[in-house]
Image: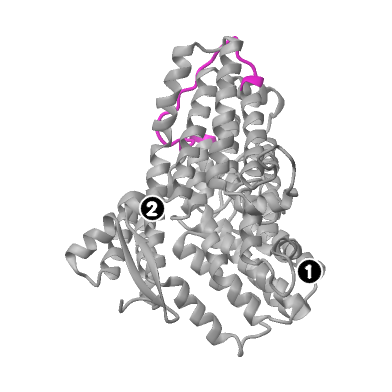
Amino acid sequence: MDFFGTAWALVPPLVAIVLALITKEVFSSLFVGILVGSLLTAGFHPIETLNNLISNDITVTVDGEEEEMSLGFVNAISDASNAGIFLFLVLLGIMVALVNSAGGSVAFGQWAARHVKTRVGTQLATFFLGILIFIDDYFNCLTVGAVMRPVTDEQKISRAKLAYIIDSTAAPICMIAPISSWAAAVSSTADDIEGVSGIKLFIEAIPYNFYSLLTLVFVVGIIIMGFDYGPMAKAELAAYKDGELGIEGAEEKIENEKANIFDLLIPVIILIIFSVIGMLYVGGYWDSEGETYHNIADAFGDTDAGVALPWGALVALLISFIYLLARRVISFKKAADTVTAGFKAMVPAMLILTFALTLKLSTKALGADVFVRDIMEGSADSLYKLLPAVIFLVALGLAFSTGTSWGTFGILIPIVTTIFAGQTELLTIGISACLAGAVCGDHISPISDTTVMSSAGANVNHVKHVQTQIPYALSVAAVSFVCFIIAGFVQNWMITLGIGIVLTIGLLFVLRSTVGRKVDDEIVAVA
């Protein structure tokens, strides 16, 4: 293939991203990107292009060895891990529809309205709930969205702002939580490097993960300081002044005098408990006879979220059905109807995810990882001290273009460990830069599955979420880039992180006084 391992490998995702931002229509944009990828992998042969678009396996040569790559919609859907995530989405959609139909969502919203009486308090409650659900980003996005939508609606907070807070406490939190599906993925990629276990290297890298940590500072700061800027400010003003929350499609809110807040909280708590149990079980925490033979860290390291999350969601859904029927807040027929209602609600998210996963197959088959690896290895000698900052930018660009943070650190971690072999502190900083850049790129990419899940959780137009979030994410990325430059020379996380926090807070004050818009007192400045 003439285009393998060249800059052409990044063209399909870039085409999809640019079109999505211009047209504000995600499905056609993603399809055009997939079509471009199919054309390039087929060498513009029409029949082969059609095969690559639907389903095909091609053989490419990587470093002198032949590898088989899968292409097309069928392969994206039929992949076992992807199918598990689709099932999890459906089960979670049914759970949300069930709780809503029973009146639990409205009851919780009414309770929250009596106890959380300010916009600031509501946004902080959403933020802290996102931090508490650190096990998995998909689970985080959809659960926090389902619980907090009625509460933020009551306070006239836009769905775009809700989606931003959800997204900012999904991947960034998972990337600094030692017990999470992300920690498991990183530790398995970085295991036995420099004689250090992968999970230990992951933990050591947390204080240098400036993007994830400073994102949390930025979110809290912008909530407490009470302003927004850019497209987010317009969305917030429209929500506060005109009641235009930006809800995607119609949402049915059912009141039920018999329902109370526990009709929402208990299903959510059950879901959390059994999702954790599912991840431990699939990860081998218990053997076939029920004896514990793994520790928790190893179990999370060996788990498969595509199996564990549907496992936990199915058990939680069955228990929730029984609980709500026993409470007599919903009839059996209405409970059964939520199966189709929940599935329908998740169709847009599943479609976007299907397109995004298919596009990733094309990008991989074109050798995007090989292209980036060659660039990194070629620049290592001349930019040694600045490499953490360079790695951050490369990881950001790769994750943005491909829509996958896991794929990004899977590509870059082996390169980083080779570059910094024997340099313990620089190795830690380099790994952190790789992980931080991957999260940042994932955060701003329209084709990222986590971004898709955040849009689904908040039930907001996907492109709207991306457009309103990008200025915020890039603001934190700029500060993080400066921190990685400093870290390469100082090599002390306390000093560098302290500088990063000061810079982030300072940036917030500058933004508030220049381009900020305050919603509550309707002070309008230049956006």
- Residue 235 in sight: yes
Amino acid type of the residue that numbered disc 2 sits on in the rendered structure: Ala
Where is residue 185? Give x, y as percent: 61, 58
Residue range highlighted in magenta: 240-263
Name the residue located 50 percent from the left edge and 45 percent from the top edge. Answer: 453
Measured as percent of width and height from the top left, residue 367 is found at 41, 72
Main structural element of the magenta stretch: helix, strand or loop? loop
Residue assigned mark 2? 76
Q: Which residue is mark 1?
A: 493
Q: Position of residue 383 (x, y in %)?
A: 62, 86
Front-most of residues 104 and 18: 104
N-terminal-most mark, 2 or 1 = 2
Q: Badge 1: few (under 14), some or many (20 or more) residues near its Cα, within 10 Å? A: many
**Is 450 on the left or on the right of 271, as rendered?**
left
Q: Is residue 392 above or below residue 80?
A: below
Q: Quadrant of the N terminus?
A: bottom left
Q: How many marks?
A: 2
Distance between the alpha carbons at the discs numbered 2 and 1: 40 Å
- Verify CB contact (< 8 Å) between mark 2 and mark 1: no
Colour scheme used in the picture?
one colour
The amino acid type, in three-letter code, at marker 1 is Trp
Asked if 256 appears above or below 354 in the picture, the reply is above
- Residue at image coords 62%, 32%: 271
